[in-house]
């Protein structure tokens, strides 16, 4: 039913879903790159889950669900993915210094493309230029005092550790090709968690939850033990009457 909402929200269905279009759910718009986003979130989640002991029930259940959904999204590849993957690997191998900026190194490409590794997978995070709104930037003739934002001194210290920008390089980088609309629908049906945008929201929430679980050390024993029979109310088949015994033969 959820995929049908997306169709009703668009005037003319097409081969690709247009980023920013309504999905049919209030406040939720079509995501520009759901496949790499989910792979990125799931890989980060799996990386963080390794901080929990293997005996943790939360780790076991969350790992199983995350790996299952990760396999689904990885098995669906957009048209042109093989060519893009070869291009990306070539760029990273030929210009490793651009995608890796060590502490005290050169901030190549102005830090636009940054490589990271999660769960054994390589990711390149690209900073998109912010759109300038001339209405907001319009000068009203009055000088506004500058307010030092939190973390500004940290930025200055970081910049001071880098060598002059004369060694700055730029490389060509392309985003991963988009999934076709039918592929998105196929992923949504296999996962069974609503629209792919909803699945992304759940993945983002789970990634934040892992940090809270690690902070709370949920795998440890309770300081105050549960009383005898405290959880008996929630046990299975405690509130439904048993099957009535059949009457004796001959009656």
Image: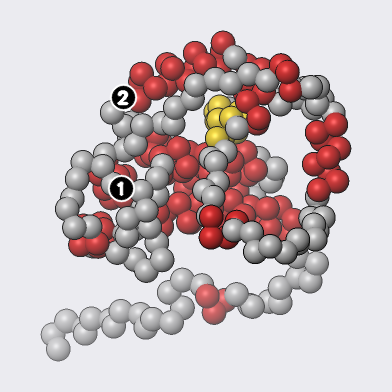
Q: Is residue 136 visible?
A: yes
Q: Nearer the viewer, residue 49 or 222?
A: 49
Q: At x 74% / y 56%, what residue is drawn?
A: 215
User: Where is residue 172 drawn, in percent x and y?
Assistant: 50, 21
Q: Nearer the viewer, residue 18 or 176?
A: 18
Q: Nearer the viewer, residue 224 or 95?
A: 95
User: Where is residue 209 drawn, in percent x and y?
Assistant: 62, 57
Quadrant of the rendered image containing residue 224: bottom right
Label 1, on which residue?
Answer: 18
Number of marks:
2
Q: Helix, strand or loop at disc 1? A: loop
CA gap, disc 1 and disc 2: 18 Å
Apparent side of residue 77 relative to residue 233 in the rendered image (left or right)? left
Q: Residue furthest left?
A: 250
Apparent side of residue 145 relative to residue 196 in the rendered image (left or right)? right
User: Where is residue 136 drawn, in percent x and y?
Assistant: 58, 60
Q: Is residue 220 above or below residue 35?
A: below
Q: Helix, strand or loop at disc 2? A: loop
Q: At x 65% / y 31%, what residue is drawn?
A: 111
Q: Is label 1 in contact with label 2 (beta carbons under 8 Å)?
A: no
Q: Residue furthest bottom?
A: 251
Residue 225 tag number: none
Q: In the rendered view, how is the structure colored?
A: secondary structure
Residue 80 tag number: 2
The quadrant of the picture occupied by the N terminus is bottom left
The quadrant of the picture occupied by the C terminus is bottom left
Q: At x 34% / y 66%, what residue is drawn?
A: 25
User: Where is residue 31 drawn, in percent x and y?
Assistant: 40, 49
Q: Which circle's residue, 1 or 2, is located before the other in the chain?
A: 1
Crowd tier of the residue under label 2, counting other residues whose Cα lies within 10 Å: few below 14, some 14–19, many 20 or above: few
Eye-nearest disc, 1 or 2: 1
């Amino acid at each position: 039913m959820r995929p049908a909402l997306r169709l009703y929200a668009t005037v003319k269905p097409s081969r690709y879903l247009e980023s920013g279009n309504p999905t049919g759910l209030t406040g939720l718009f079509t995501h520009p790159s759901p496949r790499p986003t989910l792979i990125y979130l799931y890989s980060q989640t799996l990386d963080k889950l390794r901080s929990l002991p293997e005996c943790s029930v939360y780790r076991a259940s969350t790992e199983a669900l995350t790996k299952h959904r990760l396999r689904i999204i990885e098995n669906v590849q957009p048209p042109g993915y093989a060519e893009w993957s070869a291009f990306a690997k070539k760029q990273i191998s030929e210009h490793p210094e651009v995608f890796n900026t060590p502490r005290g190194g050169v901030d190549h490409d102005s830090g636009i493309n940054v490589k990271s590794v999660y769960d054994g997978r390589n990711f390149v995070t690209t900073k998109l230029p912010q759109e300038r709104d001339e209405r907001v930037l319009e000068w009203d003739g009055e000088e506004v005092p500058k307010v030092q934002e939190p973390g500004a001194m940290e930025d200055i210290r970081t910049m001071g550790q880098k060598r002059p920008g004369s060694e700055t390089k730029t490389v060509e980088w392309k985003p991963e090709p988009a999934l076709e609309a039918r592929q998105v629908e196929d992923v949504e049906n296999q996962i069974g968690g609503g629209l792919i945008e909803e699945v992304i929201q759940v993945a983002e929430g789970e990634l934040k939850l892992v940090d809270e679980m690690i902070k709370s050390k949920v795998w440890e024993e309770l300081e105050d033990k549960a009383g005898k029979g405290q959880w008996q109310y929630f046990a299975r088949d405690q509130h439904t009457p048993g099957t009535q015994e059949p009457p004796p033969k001959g009656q």
